[in-house]
Amino acid sequence: MKHTESKPRPALVVQTLVIDIVLVLAFALSGRRNHDETLGVIGVLETAWPFLTALAAGWLICRLWRQPLRIFPHGICLWLITVAGGMALRILSGATAALPFVVVATLVLALFLLGQRIITTLLLRRTAKA
């Protein structure tokens, strides 16, 4: 039996993308705050840009607009591209990527990017039943 999924509402796609962007910015802001760095917009964007760029690439490569809340393979793909691409861009731009940072970024971005999909899916199911 072939499984077909309906096309997601455009509002859901935009909402999911915006939440992803906000979560990557929150990741950068949190990192800067924990390391006593300035929390201005420029500083946060300086830290976030590699991960935001990788996030955008992940959205394109994984075609997330088709199934923005799907964990596997879409969410996992997005998470891995965001982490790996973000780290690569950091290193290429002259910033560091020490092992503890890589571990923390991997775990936090997994929690954020996958967690938001789980929570949104559960909320949508709950409201659909109500």
Image: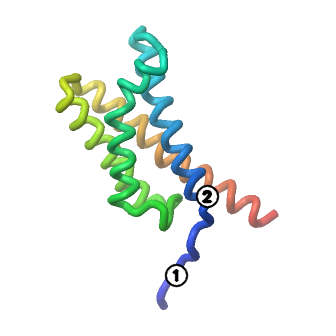
Q: Quadrant of residue 5?
A: bottom right
Q: Quadrant of residue 53?
A: top left
Q: From what the image shows, is residue 34 above or below residue 87?
A: above
Q: Which residue is mark 1?
A: 4
Tag count: 2
Comparing 110 with 55, the one in front is: 55
| Of labels 2 and 1, the one closer to you | 2
Task: Decide: few, some or many residues near mark 1? Use Cα within 10 Å; few <14, some 14-19, many ≥20.
Answer: few
Name which residue lies at 25% across and 35% down. Answer: 87
Amino acid type of disc 1?
A: Thr
Q: Label 2, label 1: how many angstroms apart (C-alpha)?
A: 18 Å
- Residue 95, image x and y in percent? 22, 23
- Residue 38, image x and y in percent? 44, 11
Q: From what the image shows, is residue 106 above or below residue 36?
A: below
Q: From what the image shows, is residue 120 above or below residue 125?
A: above
Comparing 19 with 11, the one in front is: 11
Amino acid type of disc 2?
A: Leu
Q: Which residue in the rendered view is the most extreme toward the front?
A: 42
User: Could you say which disc has been placed on residue 12 in the image?
Assistant: 2
Q: Is residue 25 left or right of residue 12?
A: left
For marks 2 and 1 on the same chain, the one whose residue lies earlier in the sequence: 1
Is the residue under label 1 in contact with that under label 2 (CB below 8 Å)?
no
Comparing 17 with 125, the one in front is: 17
